[in-house]
Image: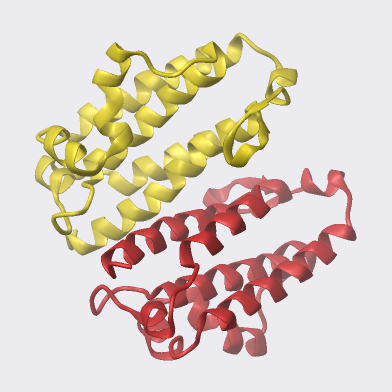
Chain colours: A yellow, B red
Amino acid sequence: MMNYVRFTTLNTVNGLTQSQLDFLLDAQSNSIGALLLHCAAVEYYYQVLTFEKRDLNEEEYSIWGAALDLGEEGREKIKGNDLSFYINKLEQVRNKTLDLFKSINDDWLYVEEDFWYDKQANHYFMWFHVFEDEINHRGQMRMIRKKINI
Amino acid sequence: MMNYVRFTTLNTVNGLTQSQLDFLLDAQSNSIGALLLHCAAVEYYYQVLTFEKRDLNEEEYSIWGAALDLGEEGREKIKGNDLSFYINKLEQVRNKTLDLFKSINDDWLYVEEDFWYDKQANHYFMWFHVFEDEINHRGQMRMIRKKINI
């Protein structure tokens, strides 16, 4: 499922130029570039959460904060990059995820921890959420792409 | 995963009025109402595909076609409904899905059939795709909702 989702995300942004990646529907919108970096940032966040059982530290937050939070800071800081920049970030983080997955077995997927809504969730669900978030934003990227008339 | 996705979809559209459900970002856009009915239509389509191994017949297509295909026909035919109309459709179709799921066991999930891209896919993946499509459109609904400033 993770691989398929990434395949569809990359298809969605295939061939976009720097200015198309920076395009904003309006002053409150996120660019496709920012949404791509958000996907990498969320995946990084869940590596740290599920494998190290901690939140991002200050240094990590200075790197990923804008992409995690999007909004005003995202619009300010995430622009001027071409597609290969975003694809490289996505690949670097994904390769780390695959390495981490090699270090555990399927039982790990069913280990439960405290999570949202005062409920427990297992690692399977947490990693489902990582690509569920990517699908959500892929839908938005498709919509934005249509509006740039490419 | 299916239940969680539906929970987030319903949260996304909670409290929307008829005119908000009909709102179009521009002349090429889909309304939130049309996207909701699309989710029900896709689920119905996969009931027929995976449990009856057939395509929609003419009568079914006359009911679900506009919601499946969206675009011009969707904009023309899917409007003027309040939220309960869409929620009822989603629930009716979901209840049928749950009934159908009761009729099979986990082995069924791993049965493979011809599918996209000249590849085989198992029923698990096909039903993942049903809610993957819902997540995709939920992302779009969230974006549209923000633009109506609710």
Q: Between A29 and B73, which is closer to the camera in this rendering?
A: A29
A54 lies left or right of A69: right
User: Residue B37, image x and y in percent?
Assistant: 53, 75
A114 relative to A147, above or below: above
What is the tally of numbered marks visible in this picture? 0
User: Residue A122, image x and y in percent?
Assistant: 67, 29
Which residue is at 31% across, 60% downward?
Answer: A143
Q: Is residue A52 something one can see in this rendering?
A: yes
Which residue is at 68% across, 33% downward?
Answer: A120
Q: Is the N terminus of chain A in the top left, top right, bottom left or bottom right quadrant?
A: top right
Which residue is at 43% across, 39% downward?
Answer: A7
Q: Is residue B130 something one can see in this rendering?
A: no
B80 relative to A30, above or below: below
B108 relative to B149, above or below: above
* Residue at the extreme front: A118
B36 lies left or right of A20: right
A83 lies left or right of B35: left
B140 lies left or right of B36: left
